[in-house]
Image (cartoon, grey):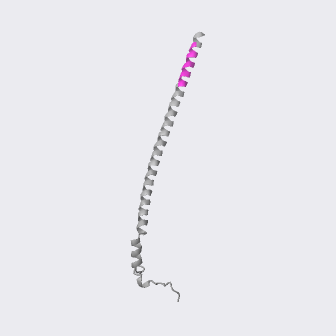
Amino acid sequence: MTLKNNIHRKADQIQKAGFHWIIIICLIFCELLVHTWIRTESTHTILRVSKAQGEYSKKISYQKALSVERDRLKSDDRITRIAKTRLSLSTHTLDQTIYLSGEDG
């Protein structure tokens, strides 16, 4: 009788040890899955940040180009040239000036 009880105890201990190993292996597997997921998300985030920085740089350079173009369009020389050529205006205003005297009558 003692021999049978002893065999059953050992079999139970072996099953419990096997169950503990399965739990440990499952925990390690889950930890590896979580680590892989975090690493993947980190890499994707780094790529999104790099892409956003590239787009930001393009927009800044485009804004600088627009600013230069605006300044060129607002320049006095360009406005004077358009007034002379397209609107037929002249810069001579001496014969168009009317002088008012301070006296009445």
Q: Main secondary structure of the magenta part?
A: helix
* Residue 20 vertical placement versus 69 (above, below): above
Residue found at x 54% / y 22%: 17
Which x, y percent locates residue 64?
Answer: 42, 60
Which x, y percent locates residue 63?
Answer: 44, 60
Q: Which residue lies furthest to the top in this view?
A: 2
Residue found at x 57% / y 13%: 6
**Residue 87: quadrant of the picture:** bottom left
Which x, y percent locates residue 69?
Answer: 41, 65
Residue found at x 44% / y 57%: 60
**Residue 94: quadrant of the picture:** bottom left
Q: Does the magenta stretch include residue 7?
A: yes
* Magenta part of the chain: 6-20
Foreground: 98 or 66? 98
Q: Is residue 27 magenta?
A: no
Which x, y percent locates residue 1?
Answer: 60, 10
* Residue 77 vertical placement versus 50 (above, below): below
**Residue 16: quadrant of the picture:** top right
* Residue 54 vertical placement versus 17 (above, below): below
